[in-house]
Image: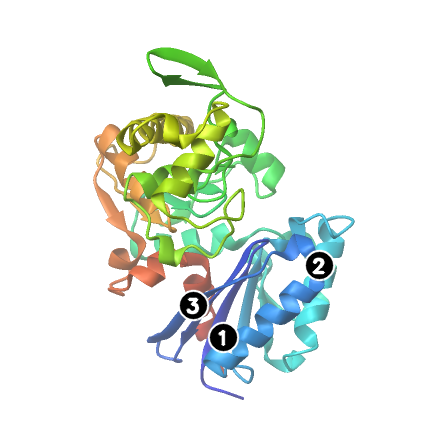
Amino acid sequence: MSSLISGWDIGGAHIKVARSTAEGELLDIIQVACPLWLGIDQLERAIETIFSRLNNQHDITAITMTGELVDIFANRQAGVAGIIACLKQYINEDNIRIYGAEAGWLTPTQAEQQWQCVASRNWQASASLISQHCPAGLFVDIGSTTSDIIPFANNTIITQGYSDLHRQSSRQLLYTGAIRTPLIALTQTAPFNGSLVSLAAEVFATSADCWLLLNQLDPSSIQDNSADGKPWAPQDCASRIARLLGTDATEAELSQWQQLAQWFAEQQINQVTNAMLQVLSACNEIPTDAPIIGAGVGRFIVKLCAQRLNRPYQDFDNILSLNSTEASDHAPAVAVALLAKSKLP
C-alpha cells in the first residue's frame, strides 16, 4: 500500500485533489472541471485527467463528496452509490477510504449502506480539522457555488443538523458562491443611470462576472463556462450583466458596468453577512473576539464580511501553518487528506 494519501472532494462541478505524505506534507493540490450533471462520463474523464497529472492511482484515496446532488441521479442515495461505483472502476477498493463524519472512515460497501453520513459532508471534514487547531470561531468556506458557515467552540463543531435541508434552514449552508451564482438570485433590481431597473429573470450573468470586473478573481483560475459560453474578459462580463438590464454593454463606459458590479457584489456580501449573523446568534459560547476563518475561492468575500462584523480574520492555510493559498482554495480535499493520515497502517 502506498504511503501517500490523495484527498478527493468530488463536487457537482469540480473535483479537487490534495496529495499528502504520511507526515502531512502537502505535495500537490489541483482542481479539475467535472460538470457531473452532464453524465457519469464526466467523472470518468476527470478521474483520468487527475491520474495523468498526479500519477496517484495507487495512493490511499480519501473521499468526500457533494456530487451526489446532481440531477442525473434519482436521489442522493443513488448518487453516493453511483460515484462510488465509478471510483471502483479506477482505484483498488482496498485503497479507498470514504469520509463518513461521525461514522468514521468507511469502506465503499459501508459507505453505500451509511450513505447519509457520506452525502455532502465535505464541510464537516474542513471544520473538524480547523476545530482541532483553533478553540473557537466561525469557519466560512465560499466556493464557486455555495457557502458553508460553521461555528465551533471548545474545539467542537456546533451544528443544528447535518443534512443539506437542515443546514439550509439554519443558514449554515447558503446557496451563494463566487463564480456560478446567477445574479438574479442576488437581487431583482439594480440601479442604472439613476433608475432602479427590474432585471430579466434569466441566467444571463453570474457572480464571477461581478468579481472579475472588480479584480477580485483571476480569470485564468476559472474552469467554469460563463453564462453565454464566451470568455471571462472584462468586456464580455459587462455584456452579460448588461443583458440582465435588457441593454448592451456599448451603451455605457466600462467604469459604469464596474459600478453596477459593485452593486451586485454588495448584495452578495449582505447575504453572507446576514447568514453569518444568524448562525452566530445561535452560538453564544463563541467569544466576540474569536476569528472568522476563510476558505474557498471566494474567501475574499469572507474577509469583507469579517471587517463588517468587526472580527479578526484568518485564512484556512494560516491556521494550519500550511502557507499554501491552494490549500485554502480547496479546503475539504486538504482536510480529508490530513484527517486520513492517522488511519495509515
How far separated are the C-alphas under marks 2 and 1? 33 Å
Q: Is residue 305 left or right of residue 34?
A: left
Note whether 135 is above or below 18 in the view shown. above
Instruction: Choose mark 2 or mark 1, whichever is in front.
Output: 2
- Name of the residue lying farthest toward the bottom: 1
How far separated are the C-alphas under marks 3 and 2? 22 Å
**Amino acid type indicated by mark 2:** Gly
Note whether 317 is above or below 92 in the view shown. above
Which residue carries the number 1 mark? Answer: 343
Residue 276 seen in the current view: no
Q: In x, y percent, where is residue 176?
A: 47, 37
Note whether 333 is above or below 189 in the view shown. below
Instruction: Choose mark 3 or mark 2, whichever is in front.
Output: 2
| SS class, disc 3 | strand
Q: Compare marks 3 and 2 and give the one earlier in the sequence.
A: 3
- Name of the residue lying farthest toward the front: 250
What mark, if any, has residue 25 been given in the picture? none
What mark, if any, has residue 39 been given in the picture? 2
Which residue carries the number 3 mark? Answer: 30
Mark 2 Cα-neighbour bin, 10 Å: few <14, some 14–19, many ≥20: some
Q: Please state which of residues 36 and 198 is positioned toward the viewer in this rendering.
A: 198
Q: Is residue 78 left or right of residue 171?
A: right
How far separated are the C-alphas under marks 1 and 3? 23 Å
Q: Are marks 1 and 3 in contact (CB under 8 Å)?
A: no
